[in-house]
């Protein structure tokens, strides 16, 4: 984890949400000096604070540790979102594959029911 890069991300996302360092600190039951140290890169969040901080900023812990937003989320969410979802967006190919798999499963289920009801299974 690069403290400077993570600190810049924390400051950027905090400001986008219109929060002061004190307000973010209050959300996490910490001091504003702790937030200031993180943002300046002279310290890093304790592992026990990572989840709460990531949630407060609307990002994943992975993004917080990397100090950068994932491309898909930053494109669709324009940075941080209070409604961050760890779900990844599917490509049209992936959607098509999943639809085919679902259709095949449905057809299989129908044939299974028919086979059971008509005694085709022996």
Image (cartoon, rainbow, N blue to C red):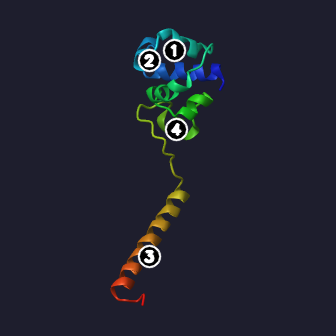
Q: Residue at x 53, y 18 (%)?
A: 11
First reached walking from the N terminus: tag 4 or tag 2: 2
The CA span between labels 4 and 1 is 24 Å
Judge the density around disc 3: few (<14), some (14-19), many (≥20) Cα neighbours within 10 Å.
Answer: few
Q: For the residues marked 3 and 2, what is the alpha-carbon distance in whole angstroms?
A: 52 Å
Sequence-earlier tag: 3 or 2: 2
Circle 1 sits on which residue?
35
Q: Nearer the viewer, residue 94 or 112?
A: 112
The image shows residue 80 at horizontal and vertical percentages of 48, 30
Outermost residue on the top side: it is: 33
Q: Is residue 53 above or below residue 77?
A: above
Q: Which residue lies furthest to the left in this view?
A: 117
Is label 3 in a helix, a strand or a loop? helix
Secondary structure of the residue carrying numbered label 4: helix
Residue, x 57% and y 34% (percent of image)?
Answer: 62
Identify the image quadrant of the C terminus.
bottom left
Marks 4, 2: nearer the viewer: 2
The residue that label 3 is drawn on is 108
* Disc 1, SS: helix
Q: Residue 24 carries which label?
A: 2
| First along the sequence among labels 3 and 1 | 1
């Amino acid at each position: 984890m690069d403290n400077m890069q993570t600190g810049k991300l924390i400051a950027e996302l905090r400001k986008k949400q219109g929060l002061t360092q004190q307000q973010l600190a209050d959300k996490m039951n910490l001091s504003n000096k702790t937030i200031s140290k993180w943002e300046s890169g002279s310290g890093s969040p304790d592992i026990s604070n990572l989840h709460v901080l990531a949630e407060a900023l609307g990002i994943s812990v992975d993004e917080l540790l990397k100090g950068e937003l994932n491309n898909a989320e930053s494109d669709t969410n324009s940075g941080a979102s209070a409604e961050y979802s760890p779900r990844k967006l599917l490509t049209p190919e992936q959607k098509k594959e999943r639809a085919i798999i679902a259709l095949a499963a449905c057809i299989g289920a129908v044939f299974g029911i028919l086979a059971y009801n008509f005694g085709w299974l022996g």
